[in-house]
Image: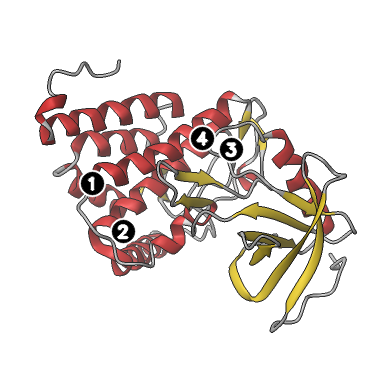
């Protein structure tokens, strides 16, 4: 498919006129720094932008106008869902640009930095819980994301910000049955896509976050390598979903040994947390039950650390 507009050159600022996503009569200029690319995906590139008042934002440039129209419509549909990124504006001149607030980098970018604290860091685990709550709110609104992974999770560094979902180009309806190819996340499980795909992907993302917290960027890289090696040794030639492997005899999918070993390792330190992630990966938990059990696990951990929590009744 041909591009609808030329690729912009690197090394200069581009000034674009945007219109408010809620009030199209309200227009404002944005200076986009082409030198500072925040990320790149299958649909386009994300750059750093600056509003007239000096506020820093993120500007997504789409490769094709069809993808731009689809994501813009999806963002309007989920605008009231708590925890999903809200678009500020979009271009009105036929060019595919959407403007977003910039609260921090993605979870994938965080995994490239050195962690602090331990696996039982309550604030860190609570942030992971905000991802589950956002996904729960999205499902209750009747939608599924279909591309949950660290690069599509934004770290909101404001107090109480937690993690936010971004990139809604693959948004689907929860009640509709999707084929395996429509579960775009390599963190998803192969098979018919749907709400269970989102739950699996969120659990896989949480597990990788634990790997990062425990071993740092090098540990995450080794985790990727070990999973790919296991796929190769099992003659699994699939290009997506590397948290599970295929049984060559039965043709069924099961969690890779590398993933199971990490779950067992972490269960020695945070057993209730790992039990929730394992339930999500084994697809026996809905996201609603995952949220409830995650919060209960955090409360029990707080009781052990802080005596004042010991007489607090756990949420049912």
* Quarter residue 99 falls in: bottom right
Q: Which residue is pictured at 40% across the width and 47% down the height?
A: 204
Upstream in the sequence, badge 1 or badge 2?
A: 1
Of circles 1 and 2, the one toward us is 1
Q: Which residue is mark 2?
A: 212
Which label was assigned to residue 121? 1
Is any atom of residue 251 visible in this view? no
Marks 1 and 3: CB-CB under 8 Å?
Answer: no
Q: Percent x, y for residue 78?
A: 66, 34
Observer-nearest of 59 and 252: 59
Residue at the extreme right of the image, as rendered: 93
Label 3: few (<14), some or many (≥20) within 10 Å?
A: many
Q: Is residue 229 above or below residue 26?
A: below
Label 1: few (<14), some or many (≥20) within 10 Å?
A: few
Marks 1 and 2: CB-CB under 8 Å?
Answer: no
Upstream in the sequence, badge 1 or badge 4?
A: 1
Report, in whole angstroms, how far the alpha carbon at label 4 lies from the one at label 2. Answer: 22 Å
Under circle 2, the secondary element is helix
Which label was assigned to residue 193? 3
């Amino acid at each position: 498919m041909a591009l609808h507009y030329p690729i912009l050159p690197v090394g200069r600022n581009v000034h674009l006129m945007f219109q408010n996503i809620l009030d199209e009569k309200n227009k404002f200029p944005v200076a986009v720094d082409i030198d500072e690319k925040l990320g790149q995906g299958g649909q386009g590139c994300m750059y750093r932008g600056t509003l007239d008042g000096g506020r820093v934002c993120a500007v997504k440039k789409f490769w094709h106008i069809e993808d731009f129209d689809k994501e813009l419509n999806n963002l309007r549909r989920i605008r009231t869902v708590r925890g999903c990124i809200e678009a500020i504006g979009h271009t009105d001149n036929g060019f595919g640009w959407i403007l977003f607030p910039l609260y921090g980098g993605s979870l994938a970018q965080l995994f490239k930095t050195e962690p602090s604290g331990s696996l039982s860091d309550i604030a860190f685990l609570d942030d992971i819980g905000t991802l589950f709550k956002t996904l729960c709110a999205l499902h209750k609104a009747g939608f599924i994301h279909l591309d949950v992974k660290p690069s599509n999770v934004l770290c909101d560094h404001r107090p109480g910000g937690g993690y936010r979902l971004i990139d809604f180009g693959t948004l689907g309806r929860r009640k509709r049955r999707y084929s395996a190819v429509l579960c775009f996340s390599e963190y998803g499980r192969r098979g018919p896509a749907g709400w269970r795909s989102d739950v699996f992907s969120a659990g896989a993302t949480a597990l990788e976050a634990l790997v990062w917290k425990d071993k740092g960027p090098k540990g995450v890289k080794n985790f990727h390598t070990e999973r790919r090696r296991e796929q190769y040794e099992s003659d699994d030639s699939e290009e997506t979903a590397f948290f599970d492997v295929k049984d060559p005899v039965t043709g069924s999918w099961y969690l890779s040994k590398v993933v199971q070993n990490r779950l067992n390792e972490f269960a020695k330190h945070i057993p209730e947390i790992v039990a929730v992630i394992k339930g999500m990966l084994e697809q026996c938990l809905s996201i609603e039950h995952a949220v409830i059990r995650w919060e209960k696990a955090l409360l029990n951990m707080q009781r052990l650390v802080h005596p004042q929590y010991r007489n607090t009744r756990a949420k049912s």
